[in-house]
Image (spheres, rainbow, N blue to C red):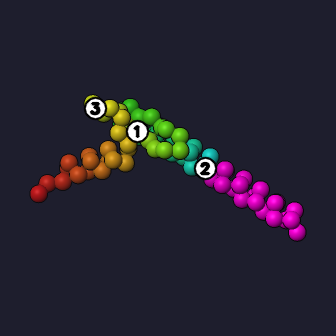
Amino acid sequence: MLSDFFAFCFFMVVLVVVSCVLGNISGAYTCNNYQDMTGITTKWVAVDACYVKTEKGWQRWDEYKARAIASELKD
């Protein structure tokens, strides 16, 4: 009975680790793909986010994208 519990816990830990690794690989690929498509310098910070190089420094990609969309809106 106790060995079943440990096997289940081990399986859950492995599942979480694999999910994190796959998510990190996907994020890094997306970040590099954005750089290839736009020519804008990017860097991937593991387990954090994609950053875009701007004139004032590094900015998170999602904030950069939101600001770019907002600047295109007109009243």
Q: Residue at x 72, y 59 (%)?
A: 12
Does residue 9 show up magenta in the picture? yes
Q: Which of the two residues, 34 or 70, is positioned nearer the viewer here? A: 70
- Tell me, yes or no, whether the two marked residues, 2 and 3, touch with CB atoms within 8 Å: no
Residue of label 1:
51
Spatial CA span between label 2 and label 3 = 31 Å
- Tell me where residue 33 appears, x and y as whole percent: 46, 40
Q: Which of the two residues, 69 or 37, is positioned nearer the viewer here? A: 69
Which stretch is magenta?
1-19
Locate residue 59: give its quadrant: top left
When the figure is inspected, residue 42 is found, relative to residue 47, above or below; the finding is above
- Mark 2 Cα shell of 10 Å, populated few (<14), some (14-19), many (≥20): few
Residue type highlighted by circle 1: Tyr
Q: Secondary structure at mark 2?
A: helix
Furthest toward the left, the residue is 75
- Tell me where residue 7 appears, x and y as whole percent: 82, 60
Mark 2 or mark 3, earlier in chain: 2
Residue of label 2:
20
Residue type highlighted by circle 3: Lys
- Tell me, yes or no, whether the two marked residues, 1 and 3, touch with CB atoms within 8 Å: no
Spatial CA span between label 1 and label 3 = 13 Å
